[in-house]
Image: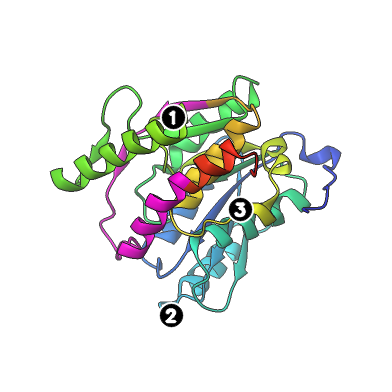
Amino acid sequence: MKPLRKQDASGENRSIVVIPTYNEAENVPVVLDELMTLPEQVHALVVDDGSPDGTGRCVKTRMQKYPGRISLIEREGKMGLGSAYLCGFDWALERGYAFICSMDADLSHNPADISRLIAPVLEGRADLAVGSRYAEGVRVVNWPLTRLILSYCAGMYTRFVTRLPIRDVTAGFMCYHRRVLEAIDFDRVTSNGYSFLLEMKFRAWRRRFVLLEIPIIFTERTEGQSKMTRAIVREAAFKVWELRLRQLFGRL
């Protein structure tokens, strides 16, 4: 069971962006520079899985440039997207952050859109804001048609099975109010690939938190390599039914 965490008074309106990385030396400096310009004065936490390309060194350079606003957790080897996020969420909760965001490091998410995700959570209109590629139409740039169709159909399949009322079920661009993460027992989260993003939304929804999709434009990376593999796709396909069955049998 995850221990309760106290929120300090100074954390009432503090925001942080958790960014998992593996071999993102070309992109992560740009992401961090753009985040540091936001009017919300957000902080950033990079969780790096032992990138051999020097991602960690790039982050440390930015830590010197923006003292007190960027932090780094360096892990030994690739331990998975889900575990990276949970590690970062634990770190942020323990330090009293009120609004905890997640985003990719490859510039497929526009750092300026963080402000649009924080706003509805700060204003109390949502507990979890989701930057959606499929709210108000399809908003994806530089994807081949086959990948777009696969992604869209996978979302329809997932919604049909789980009943999750979100169009972009695997979106990784989100802002959580800390109460959402505090309500989820991280020890019971079993996904570690992209299905982790689905599982977190599903668990938040099942706990009756308010989820709100914010339309964003998703741009395919131009630097580095995608982390998507067949194993990750298989995990996501099976995870949909696992979550549904756990829901039906009261095992969530």
Picture residue at 54% right of the left edge, 38% below the top: 202
Whether residue 233 is in magenta: the answer is yes
Task: Look at the numbered disc 3 and give the secondary structure of its residue.
Answer: loop
The answer to whether 146 appears left or right of 179 in the picture is left
| Residue 242 in view of the camera | yes
Mark-to-mark CA distance, 1 and 3: 19 Å
The answer to whether 8 appears left or right of 195 in the picture is right
* Front-most of residues 124 and 182: 182
* Front-most of residues 110 and 216: 216
Mark-to-mark CA distance, 1 and 2: 36 Å
Task: Look at the numbered disc 1 and give the secondary structure of its residue.
Answer: loop
* Mark 2: amino acid: Pro
User: What residue would you read off at disc 2?
Assistant: 52
| x then y, percent, for residue 157 | 33, 37
User: What residue would you read off at disc 3?
Assistant: 189
Residue 91: name its quadrant. bottom right
Whether residue 186 is in magenta: the answer is no
Total label count?
Answer: 3
N-terminal of the two: label 1 or label 3? 1
Picture residue at 85% right of the left edge, 45% below the top: 6
Contact check, label 2 and label 3, Cβ < 8 Å? no
